[in-house]
């Protein structure tokens, strides 16, 4: 037998910021202790650590081992394809995998708040990246 699968091209895999924040919450508060995590100590050495639920030091490497692979690997698809409203992104944001999830989430929240309060760009670009009707737009409300 033959198995044919399709995955959207990378330019169509944008994850809405709201859903990325929800994912980071899941990383931070995942209900199991993660026993085999790696961190960098103050001297720059890799050290193994245990990260219980609510630990702010969980990062994307940890999330990959304890959330992404267990939940998405069997489908041979990206996590966002399975669990997010993926689509073309209006803004590309990158994140450091080794950064603590709580810091990445705080940065996203600050960016969202800054963009929405300062009306950056005053364009018809939706901050979510796609599906404009669902979330607050960055359009100039005075026009």
Image (cartoon, rainbow, N blue to C red):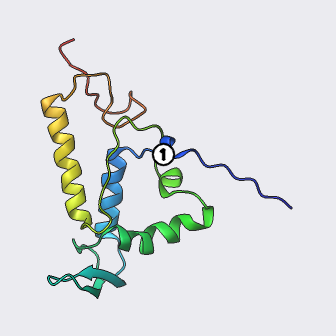
Residue 18 % position (x, y) = 32, 46
Q: Which residue is mark 1?
A: 13
User: Residue 90's quadrant in the figure?
Assistant: top left
Q: Which residue is at the far front?
A: 44
Q: Residue at x 52, y 57 (%)?
A: 78
**In the image, is 19 to the left or to the right of 120?**
right
Name the element at disc 1. Answer: loop
- Quick check: 116 above or below 19? above
- Quick check: 134 above or below 124? below
Q: Residue at x 46, y 49 (%)?
A: 84
User: Residue 99's quadrant in the figure?
Assistant: bottom left
Q: Residue at x 38, y 69 (%)?
A: 63
Residue 72 % position (x, y) = 54, 64
User: Residue 125's quadrant in the figure?
Assistant: top left
Residue 3 % position (x, y) = 77, 58
Tally of marks: 1
Q: Which residue is at the far right?
A: 1
Q: Nearer the viewer, residue 102 or 93?
A: 93
Q: Which residue is at the far top?
A: 143
Q: Residue at x 29, y 28 (%)?
A: 137
**In the image, is 125 to the left or to the right of 82?**
left
Residue 82 % position (x, y) = 53, 54
Tell me the quadrant of the picture where the N terminus can be found.
bottom right
- Quick check: 44 above or below 105? below
Q: Residues within 10 Å of mark 1 (few under 14, many from 20)?
A: some
- Quick check: 10 above or below 117? below
Tell me the quadrant of the picture where the C terminus can be found.
top left
């Amino acid at each position: 037998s033959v198995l044919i699968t399709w995955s959207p091209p990378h330019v169509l895999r944008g994850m809405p910021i709201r859903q990325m924040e929800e994912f980071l919450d899941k990383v931070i508060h995942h209900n199991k202790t993660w026993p085999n995590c790696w961190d960098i100590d103050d001297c720059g050495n890799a050290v193994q650590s245990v990260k219980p639920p609510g630990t702010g030091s969980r990062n994307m490497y940890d999330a990959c081992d304890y959330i992404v692979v267990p939940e998405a690997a069997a489908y041979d698809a990206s996590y966002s394809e399975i669990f997010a409203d993926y689509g073309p992104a209006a803004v590309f944001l990158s994140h450091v995998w080794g950064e603590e999830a709580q810091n990445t989430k705080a940065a996203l929240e600050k960016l969202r708040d800054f963009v929405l309060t300062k009306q950056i760009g005053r364009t018809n670009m939706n901050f979510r990246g796609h599906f404009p009707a669902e979330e607050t737009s960055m359009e100039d409300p005075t026009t």
